[in-house]
Image: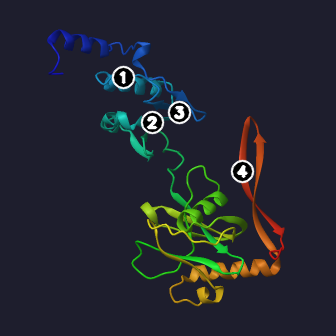
Amino acid sequence: MKYFSKSTRKLLITSCSYSSRLRTYEPHQFFVGEKDRFNGVTINTDKENFDKTCFTQRLEASIGKWASERKRCIWFKVNIKDAHFVPVLADKGFNFHHARDNFVMMYKWLPNDSEPNLPPASHTNLGVGALVFNSKNQLLAISEKHYEYPHWKLPGGYVERGEDIIDAAKREVKEETGVNTSFLSLLTFRHQHNMMFGNSDIYILLMMKALSEKIILSHREVKDCKWMEVEEYVNHPHVHQFNRLVIQKANYYIKKHLKLDLEKTTVKWAQLTREMTYLSVNDYDYNN
């Protein structure tokens, strides 16, 4: 406040104040937000006008109002340009829930007679790997950079937000090796804990057919890439045991003419419409 004149300071204090004796507030002194079906409220700093000089007083008034209305969880979505509000919210009892590139979500649980019953922040990473066969029944193997030990692995990586599993596998193979592919079957998946950022990790393995065979190496991620005979790969000392299991699964499905397909459908219930992918087990002749 030292940068304002006395008259300006008086005006700011008056405009931000509320009667502590009567505990009455003007409507403009409350945050509006959006109500949710769990009797909570979400405030988005991108959608409301925030005056830095009045933020603390407005927050205190709003918390009092929400508490009197028996609201449960108060969420504050703080855009990165409004990050200066984070310390104020933390001082008023708000905790971090999750964050993205351009915002952090903070929350305050108001009921004193119950523990927070909130959905957890995202705690599981989703990845996809591809067992790619060419017309000679060779498989595509890569050796990545940034590994501290020699290895031959299958191309793959993380699934992006809003990306389907099959599309992710095609993209990763293309980015790392330059090879175009089509989907054949889901093979298996692994589930591990305490992985990147302390999250759990699900890695899905797909069997793919090569639509092109020329390798165009991604020098950013991949140190080496080549087509290998299946027998050479499964017996190579630098191949992980799990990848040998993946080969066994592929051979079993081919022999039994089984395909674990990923099919899409649109599902409607109540007033919601969702597109979803589900697993379907079908007969399939891999020789055609």
Of the numbered discs 2 and 3, the one sitting upstream in the chain is: 3
Residue 198 at x, y percent in the picture = 44, 62
Residue at mark 4 to residue at mark 1: CA–CA distance:
42 Å
Residue assigned mark 3: 40
Between circles 4 and 1, the one closer to the viewer is 4
Disc 4 marks which amino acid? Answer: Met
Disc 3 marks which amino acid? Answer: Gly
Q: Secondary structure at mark 3?
A: loop
Q: Secondary structure at mark 1?
A: helix
Split into 4 quadrants, where in the image is the N terminus?
top left
Between circles 2 and 3, the one closer to the viewer is 2
Q: Name the image quarter holding residue 157.
A: bottom right
Q: Residues within 10 Å of mark 4 (few under 14, many from 20)?
A: few
Residue at mark 1 to residue at mark 3: CA–CA distance:
18 Å
Residue at mark 2 to residue at mark 4: CA–CA distance:
28 Å
Q: Residue at x 41, y 36 (%)?
A: 79
Residue assigned mark 1: 58
